[in-house]
Image (cartoon, rainbow, N blue to C red):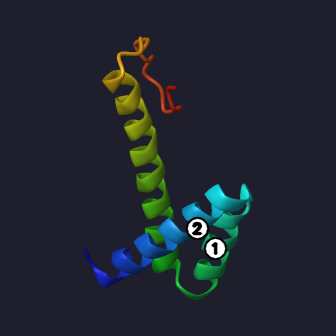
Amino acid sequence: MSKVEEIADGLARRALELFNKTGDETIEKRIADEIGASSPTLQEAYNTALRIRKAELRASRLLDKYSVGDAIPKAAISSQPQD
């Protein structure tokens, strides 16, 4: 992992933790805007890290459902999360 990716992932983790704690939906964008004012490269890495972490969380939740034997309807092909 590059230094930029490492920094971006750390910021993404902190932003998601703070969002989960406060419910403030503006945190992610405010951090991205602040980063982008100085480093568009870091901003893009941060946005990517957020998307990856959110995708990981959705996948983990779905795997948890499978693990306990919940009936999971087959998802339509979509870019939208399937719960």
- Residue in the image at 27% along x and 79% along y: 2
Q: Residue 25, relative to residue 45: is it above or below?
A: above
Q: Residue at x 41, y 80 (%)?
A: 7
Of pointers 2 and 1, the one earlier in the residue sequence = 2
Proximity of marks 2 and 1: CB atoms separated by less than 8 Å: yes
Where residue 73 sits, quadrant-wise, is top left
Residue 78 in percent (x, y) is at 47, 26
On screen, residue 24 versus residue 36, left or right, reads right
Q: Which residue, given by chain and number where applicable, does mark 1 sit on?
A: 31
- For disc 2, the neighbor class at 10 Å (few under 14, some 14 to 19, many from 20) is many
In x, y percent, where is residue 5? Answer: 35, 74
Query: Eyeballing the image, is 48 above or below 42?
Result: above
Task: Point out residue 10 in the picture as x, y percentages from the top left corner.
Answer: 44, 74
Q: From this view, report whether residue 67 is shown above or below residue 39.
A: above
Between the residue at mark 2 and the residue at mark 1, the CA separation in whole angstroms equals: 8 Å
Residue 3, above or below 5:
below
User: Which residue occupies 42% across, 21% down?
Assistant: 77
Q: Check disc 1 and report its element: helix, strand or loop.
A: helix
The quadrant the N terminus occupies is bottom left
Task: Look at mark 2 in the image and give the residue it sits on.
Answer: 15
Q: Is residue 50 visible?
A: yes
- In this view of the protein, which residue sits in the foreground, 1 or 15? 15
Disc 2 is placed on an element classified as helix
